[in-house]
Image: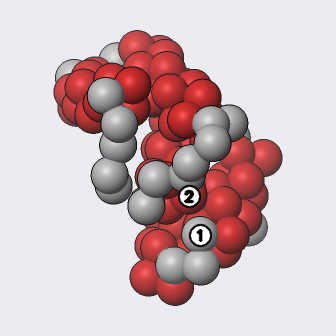
Amino acid sequence: MLLSARGLRWYPLMAAGHLARMADRPAEASRRYREARAVLEEIARGDRVPMGLPSALAVTIMLIAQVEEDPALAREALERARLADDAPLVRRVGMELEPLLA
């Protein structure tokens, strides 16, 4: 994804979420992923939508849904992937969140 200087905060937040998840700290992972989502949503409210933003939002929401085991977020992640018009991402989100979408 192409991000402005404001959006560059997304990368370390996602990395922190992944590290927390690997260390079996789901609450911290969720917090970091939610912070990353907030960064992307702030950018989405701007004048320009960077290339890849809809897909990045879908992935970020997918990770929150996985950590929190939240079916509503799983449905939102799938809908965001569809809105991004990214067929491989739609398949990935559908497969990874299948237990929550059932």
As rendered, which of 22 and 61 lies closer to the eye? 61
Q: Left or right? Give the position of 37 relative to 80.
A: left
Q: Left or right? Give the position of 48 relative to 20.
A: right
Q: What number is the disc on residue 84?
A: 1
- What's the residue type where badge 2 is placed? Pro
Q: Which colour scheme is used?
A: secondary structure
Of all residues, the one furthest to the right in this rendering is 72
Where is residue 43 shown, x and y percent of the image?
55, 35
Where is residue 22 shown, x and y percent of the image?
22, 32
- What's the residue type where badge 1 is placed? Ala
Write the residue at 32% across / 52% down: 2
Q: Do the residues labelled 2 and 1 touch (CB within 8 Å)?
A: yes
Dividing the picture into quarters, in which one does residue 25 lie? top left
Q: What number is the disc on residue 17?
A: none
As rendered, which of 44 and 57 lies closer to the eye? 44
Write the residue at 24% across / 26% down: 12
Q: Quadrant of the N terminus?
A: bottom left
Write the residue at 35% across / 43% down: 3
Q: Quadrant of the C terminus?
A: bottom right
Q: Mark 2 points at which residue?
A: 54
Write the residue at 52% across / 85% down: 87
